Structure formats: C-alpha cells, structure tokens
Amino acid sequence: MELRLYDTLTKDKRAFKPIDPRNVRMYVCGPTVYDFAHIGNARPVIVFDVLFRLLRHIYGEQHVTYVRNITDVDDKINDRALRDYPGLPLNEAIRKVTEKTATQFHADVDALGCLKPTVEPRATDFVLPRADGKADMVSLIKTLIDRGHAYEANGEVLFDTASMPDYGKLSGRRLDEQQAGARIAVDAHKKHPADFVLWKQSSADEPGWDSPWGRGRPGWHIECSAMSAAYLGDVFDIHGGGLDLIFPHHENEIAQSRCAHGTHAMANYWLHNGFLQVEGEKMSKSLGNFVTINELLKDWPGEVVRLNMLKTHYRSPIDWTVKGLEESAKVLDDWYATAGDIKGSAPAGTVLDTLADDLNTAQTVAALHGLRHQAERGGEAERNEFASSLRLLGFLAETRADWDARKQEASGVDAAQVSALIADRTAARARKDWKESDRIRDELAAMGVAIKDSKEGTTWEIAR
Ligand SMILES: [Zn+2]
C-alpha cells in the first residue's frame, strides 16, 4: 500500500513521503470560537480525523503529530461578547464566549467519533514571545519587517505582497491581475491592494497586547503561521482545511511562513475538502437551512453523521440531505448487527487501499458493504476483518446493546409492550390461529418493529 495525496499547490496526486517517518506532521485550521459549529465545519474535522487515523496506522500512533488550533482572538468574538454579556468588562466577556464555544465544539467533535489532535493550541497563547521559546506572532512579524516583507503604515503592520515573487501560487491569483481588477477603493496606506494585515491597533476597549507597534492584536492569518511553526517546525508535511480557506487564508499563511523562515515551502502537501450544501441549496442563516452539529446530534447518532460525511469523496461537493442520513442510519444498524461486539484484528486490504488512494472514503464505504456481505456468510476471520476496518474509520465506538437501546429509545417503542405482543403471537401460532398471528405481526410493523422467527424463538428490532 502506498499513500497518495492530492496536493492543491501542485495540482497533482502523488506518493506521500514524510519529511521524517518517525514524526509525521499535520496542521489543520481549527474553529473560531464564537458560535456553534455547523455541519460545514464538521467536514474538515471528520475528513482529517480519518487521515490522522490512517497516518497513525501506517507510521505508528506515536509517530504522528496532528495540530488543530483554536482561534480565540477575532473581531467576531468581540462582537459576540458585547452582544451576549453587555454588563461585563470585554476581556471577561470574551473569555466566557470562547470557553463556552470551545467546550461545545469539543463535545460535538467527540460525538462525531473524532480523536483529539495531538496538540490544540489557542491563538492567544502565541501572540507574545513565550517563555518556552516556541514561535509566536510578534516575533514572526518582527522577522518579516527585518527581512523586508512587511511594513508599518497607518498604525497597522502589513505584509508586502510584492516582496514575494511567487505570491498567489496556491490559489492561482496573480498580483498584477488583482491590481487591474481591483474595483474596490484601495486603502490608501497599502502599497498594493493585496497587502494584508499582520497587526492592527486596538482601541482602549478592544482586546490588545503591547507590541513594538503599540497596543494591538494580530491578523487572523499570522496565528496559523505561528502555531504551526511552534509545534511542527518551519516546514512540515500536511496542511489541511476547507476549500474556502485557500484564499486568502492559506495563501497568506504560506506567504508569511515562507518569507519569515526563508523556505521554499510551508507544507509539502496542501489538502482541501470540498463545499457542503443542504438539500441542494447553499447553507445560510437567511435561508433557514443552517444546521449546527449540536442540533443534528439531537436527532442522529454521531456515527450516522460521520458515515454520511464519508460517503462522499472529501474533494467533491457534498449534498447534505435527511434522506442520506436515513440511509446512513440503516447501514450502521446493519454494521452494528454484524460487528458491533467484535474487536477485530487487522483491517482489510481493500479498505486500506481505497483510503491510501487520496482518502477515497466513497470507495471505502463500498468496500465495507462487500466486507459485511463476506462477514455475514463467512467465519470469525471475516468478521474480525470487517470489525477492524470499521474501527479504523472511527466506527463501532458503542456496544451493540447501547446502539440498539438508543435506537429503541429514539423510536419511542415500549419494549414491554412488544414482548407482550410477541408472547400473544407465539400463543396464537401454537394454537394455529394464523389470522391472529398475522394481525399481531401487522400491529408490530405499524409500531415500527420488525420480527424474525427462528428455531430459538422470535427476536425483534426497530425497523428504520
Ligand atoms: Zn489557518
């Protein structure tokens, strides 16, 4: 098996060669913690969790470092703090907003079956130079100024895009085109309209840190350049995120990191997941189809959401539908029925091969259907392989009994009533009253209960 990944920067799928196989390093942009995460946010979290699991499988659990940051300084956070806690001092209000939202985010992604990243740095811990000497934003900005890649103007520090000959390579946007096409009024203090903020001044009532450029706060892009360098070094293996982050966020991360460190690359593979729409429409608050993970988890087990996400290749757009969720739920019922109580030994070759092919989880799910078929007809070896494959992908976190109990609870079916009806039906069958037996079967079916007769007796389950 050879892992191949599609790189947005070089626009090709090629063999993955880590810089150091004893420490494979991946960075993924995390949430800005001011509001509930929506299912669009869940996509990169799930996709890169699968990649994290695959890398751990290939290189060993101790040999993969996965960093996903938390952006806890942002003007959207300030706005939310002022709105939700008008009576509190701003810093205190901000802490309440970020702590509450980060806690919610962790609960959501745990329920989606995602492993914790190796490190989860918070931006506010990396603004000023640190006692441990790890990279920080102020030092990076200083270096950029010293190297002639940034300048101070109008109380801001700006990145000088013209100082980087190949700026725009990731997104394919060229500077001269941007200048020609710029219809918006150019901020007079910028040398070039594409120049972006590294540092901006804070007013007395805004959050701020004392810096060589006065009391202020960092721009968004510099956060990720600092936190990735702090834990992964100047150049690392994989940088991931959603397609919507390619420009300007990732483009600017690359510009900052490469120019500050004097390197030819920030990361060797740039991976981006596709967009997500809901029932055929773009998700937006105004359309009323804005679905948070939190709401979704009230109606569906996290593994159903996870499977529904992985049925589509991560680079393809995904259409999120209730019908898709219903189908995913049925599939998981089957998987739990076959393998829910099996630990497993080693995942199947077909599963590893499809994952290694640029994380083709759509093919992996197809392979799992085949494996389930084999497990149902085969012996312990087949069932072990099937269970192990599911566990590699982050499924079967519950026991089969818990899974069934949850399904039963969600259905509102009274187990005692079902047992009584089945006993009545068994009695009817014993006296060869087929009409009554059929009537009871229909009554159970109307309740959403499917029964199965065998030599051992009658069993039942909730039919989805
Ligand atoms: Zn980022």
Image (cartoon, rainbow, N blue to C red):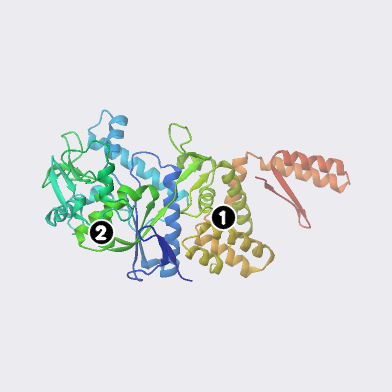
> Residue 449, image x and y in percent?
70, 44
- The residue depicted at 19 percent of the width and 58 percent of the height is 260
Q: Nearer the viewer, residue 220 or 429?
A: 220
Mark 1 and mark 2: Cα distance apart in space: 40 Å
Frontmost of labels 1 and 2 is 2
Query: Which residue appears farthest toward the front when viewing the image?
Result: 180
> Residue 107, image x and y in percent?
42, 46
> Residue 219, image x and y in percent?
23, 45
Give the number of marks: 2
Mark 1 or mark 2, earlier in chain: 2
From the viewer's perspective, tell me whether residue 50 is left or right of residue 438. left
Asked if the residue at label 2 sits under 8 Å from ligand 1, the reply is: no
> Residue 30, image x and y in percent?
35, 49
Evaluate if marks 1 and 2 touch, with contact meaning CB atoms under 8 Å apart: no
Query: Which residue appears farthest toward the right when viewing the image?
Result: 432
Q: Amino acid at mark 1?
A: Thr
Residue 225 vs 437, above or below: the answer is: below
Mark 2 sits on what residue?
229
Q: Amino acid at mark 2?
A: Ala
Q: Nearer the viewer, residue 337 or 153?
A: 153
- Specify few, some or many for label 2: CA neighbours under 10 Å numbering under 14, 14-19, or 20 or more: many
- The residue depicted at 41 percent of the width and 46 percent of the height is 41
> Circle 1 — which element?
loop
Q: Which mark is residue 411?
A: none
Residue 75 vs 309, above or below: the answer is: above
- The residue depicted at 70 percent of the width and 39 percent of the height is 447
Mark 1 sits on what residue?
399
> Circle 2 — which element?
helix
- Residue 61 picture quarter: bottom left
